[in-house]
Image (cartoon, rainbow, N blue to C red):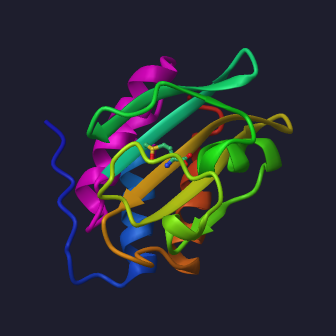
Amino acid sequence: MYDFRPDAALPKAELYRQLIAAAAALTEGERDGIANMANVAALMWEYLPDLNWAGFYRVVDGELVLGPFAGRPACIRIPLGQGVCGAAAASGTTQLVPDVHAFPGHIACDAASRSELVVPVARDGAVIAVIDLDSPLLARFDSEDAAGVEALAAMLATRI
Ligand code: SME
């Protein structure tokens, strides 16, 4: 049994340090990328407060396809360049969106979402997936969240 219980009072940087350590331990030596994404989606859901969706989209044959996640059922396929996830995948850059209603082309999988953070996972110079976090709170994510999820993405690049 894995029991990585986060302490809600931790400073954000420490919370991400612990999340990444837990994710590294859970994925260490496991070659199945889907299994690893599934466990990391569950960890993000447990560690990070105020989320309504946490998970992965994978780049498959030139489009994003839904991967393992926690939260409500979501859009299955997203063309590169569309929505927040598609923008992250097409540009290879983190998308920090404080108000999704102000993001042109945002794809509303869950009407409750108000802010979003999407971080690309790159391997050998190509984006292979994105990590997507959604929150019902306006401006839930900041630069510390972006840095934390980028570090998580870098650790996972060879494990998914
Ligand atoms: N809102 C995302 C779509 C994915 S769902 O939020 C899970 C977007 O605009 O890309």
Q: Quadrant of the C terminus?
A: top right
Q: Nearer the viewer, residue 19 or 54?
A: 54
Pick out the residue farthest to the right. Answer: 125
* Residue 136 image position (x, y, % from top left): 30, 65
Residue 44 shown in magenta: yes
Q: Nearer the viewer, residue 61 or 47?
A: 61
Residue occupying the point 79% across, 42% down: 90
Query: In the rendered structure, which segment of residues is drawn in magenta?
Result: 24-52
113 in relation to 72, above or below:
below
The quadrant in which residue 94 appears is bottom right
25 relative to 132 in the view: left or right: left
Residue 46 shown in magenta: yes
65 in relation to 146, above or below:
above
Q: Quadrant of the N terminus?
A: top left
Q: How many marks?
A: 0
Residue occupying the point 45% across, 21% down: 34
* Residue 105 image position (x, y, % from top left): 63, 51
